[in-house]
Amino acid sequence: MNTLKAAAALLLLLGGTAQAAPIDVDFSFASMGAYTGNVTGELVFAAAGTDVAATGIYIYTAPAGTVGAAFLNVNLVPSSLFNDNQFTVSASGAVSQPFLSLVDETMSPEFELELDYYNVNLAGQYGAAEDFGGASAITFTPVATVPEPASMALLGGALLTLGMTRRRWQV
């Protein structure tokens, strides 16, 4: 039984070092300029805070002529150039004061996305300023987090330990 107690103590000690899960936020808006259609995607943040940078930006849908099919559903962060990338994000995933200016010249056509609390712009083709299309207000929707496997293992180990301890007391 001492071995079981030692294992339970080790599980509790190791469980304290688990890091918080990333915060995922879906976004969407309707482009109303030269490129009409819906834009949907996801922002990933390492943690909540003020003036935090998105660590991942995915584009799921975009109007024709902006993002080529080969680039949809691809994380744009590694190959993208950010002029600005800062958000205020709460622990629940609520986004306020977004400020993102992403220009990816490695894509053909060039892709540009601007999100801020005043306007939303999307450009494709050659990325010229006249290609920008105004948009309806952007919507941010927090994605529910799923418990990580290590947390579930810790919870299961703790419940098993409690159950075995209670069983021992009842005998």
Image (spheres, rainbow, N blue to C red):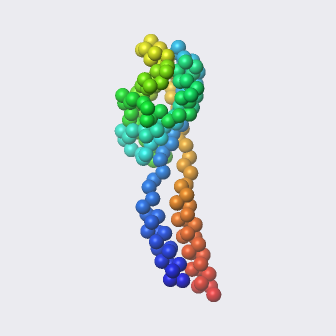
Q: Residue at x 46, y 64 (%)?
A: 15
Percent across and percent down for residue 161 are 56, 74
Q: Residue at x 55, y 18 (%)?
A: 65
Query: Which of the 4 quarters of the picture holds residue 147?
Result: bottom right
Q: Residue at x 59, y 78 (%)?
A: 164
Quick check: can you spot residue 145? Answer: yes
Q: Nearer the viewer, residue 52 or 4?
A: 4
Q: Relative to 127, is 166 on the left or the right? A: right
Query: Which of the 4 quarters of the picture holds residue 170?
Result: bottom right
Percent across and percent down for residue 139 are 52, 32
Q: Residue at x 53, y 78 (%)?
A: 4
Q: Residue furthest bottom?
A: 171
Residue 140 higher or lower than 15, as above or below? above
Residue 107 higher or lower than 10, as above or below? above
Quadrant assignment for the N terminus: bottom right
Q: Nearer the viewer, residue 119 or 23?
A: 23
Quick check: can you spot residue 97? Answer: no
Percent across and percent down for residue 52 are 38, 40
Quadrant assignment for the C terminus: bottom right
Residue 149 higher or lower than 7, as above or below? above
